Image: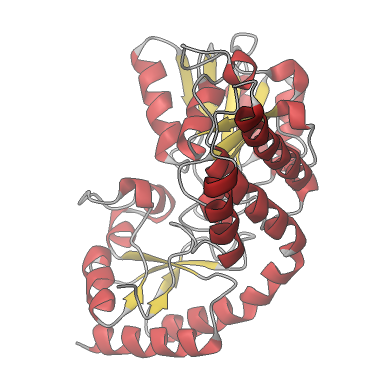
Amino acid sequence: MTSAVYLDWNATSPPLASVIEVMADTARQAWGNPASVHASGRAARDVVESAREEIARLVEASPRDVIFTSGGTEANNLALHGAPALVTSVLEHPSITRVAEMLEAAGRAVRWLPVPANGRLEPEAVAAALVGLAAGAVVAVAAANHETGVIQPLAEIAEVVRAAGARLHVDAVQGVGKLPAEVLSGADTLSLAAHKIRGPKGIGALVHRPERAPRPLLVGGSQERGRRPGTVDPVAAAGFRVAAAWARQSLPSRALLGPLRDRLELELVRQGALVNGADAPRLAHVSNLSFAGVAGDELVAALDLLGVAVSSGSACSAGTTEPSKIIQAMGGLARARGAVRVSLGDATTERDVELALAAFARVLHQ
């Protein structure tokens, strides 16, 4: 059973019918081990390499520089593994902030960037944080925030990172397919996840510059040129290929979600909501709203009973009772406690927005 109105596309997106079809076909025809040299293995290998080429096209990279992973979390961990020093912020996904905490506990230099009220990092702060750090320091930043949709000034950040001789890792999980590929061009490494672009769960990728190949996080095999051992699933790769092609071709249509998001936002502001990140450039499909005197997790639960799916933070932080650290850093604890994220997708309709607004009105009135 699924929600009547699904407005949690940042958590995951429904797989395309074409993704499901190609995965079913691959499971029947090319289920072999891509590392095997016999006919079944070669067929599976062809599927994997075709997917690698399509993902490379999506981010305008070389297929040789695409490493398959289990998802965005592993890709982020792989990119940061072995970093001698790290610059990041509490705005990042837990797969980055937890790595930063572990590095800090191990005695590595970790510098946390100040968070402006609008959630958009300042390149000058990045430059200041890099002063005095060891060669090879890494700056980790998301292309677009997973909770607020705020788009970071990647070109300016990349410039100060290069000037300092450091490396830039961009978590592009929420940005790829929503931002033009050139916006991501300053990154040394990029993390992707198929299920955010209507592909399957359980597969992602780390894309790197040729001279910035990551140190392996896992050991045990020579797959992915020794940088990520383990058998790549050709079935998941086939789905990723179709999703990547769709994301590249449908990029211009993402802007069409802006008016729907703005309509929902305007009406909820009239009902007392505050928009987190309103003063910064944001992805057109995301809105993070705080309601005074209302617990965000309780609002999410009440809306779910009415058939509307939204969230109160990152799906990777679900199950905790703590308010969003991101919204807390931007606007304080009270604002974080009442925060709800609404994220639309290409299948969202005007009718969905109408039903969602009616549900919000009913719950907030109660």
Type of colouring: secondary structure
Give the residue at x 66% y 31%.
45
**Left or right: where does residue 324 sit relative to residue 84?**
left
Q: Is residue 186 above or below residue 312?
A: above
Q: Quadrant of residue 297?
A: bottom left
x and y percentages locating residue 142 in the rendered image? 57, 42
Point out the image quarter for the N terminus.
bottom left
Q: Is residue 162 above or below residue 31?
A: above
x and y percentages locating residue 309 in the rendered image? 35, 72
**Left or right: where does residue 184 sit relative to residue 83?**
right
Residue 328 appears in view: no
Q: Quadrant of residue 11?
A: bottom left
Residue 261 appears in view: yes
Q: Nearer the viewer, residue 79 or 203?
A: 203
Total marks in image: 0
Give the residue at x 60% y 72%.
346
x and y percentages locating residue 335 in the rendered image? 33, 61
Q: Nearer the viewer, residue 248 or 301?
A: 248
Point out the image quarter for the C terminus.
bottom left
Q: Is residue 47 above or below residue 241?
A: above
x and y percentages locating residue 167 in the rendered image? 67, 22
Give the residue at x 67% y 68%.
254
Q: Nearer the viewer, residue 306 or 340?
A: 306
Q: Nearer the viewer, residue 40 or 55?
A: 40
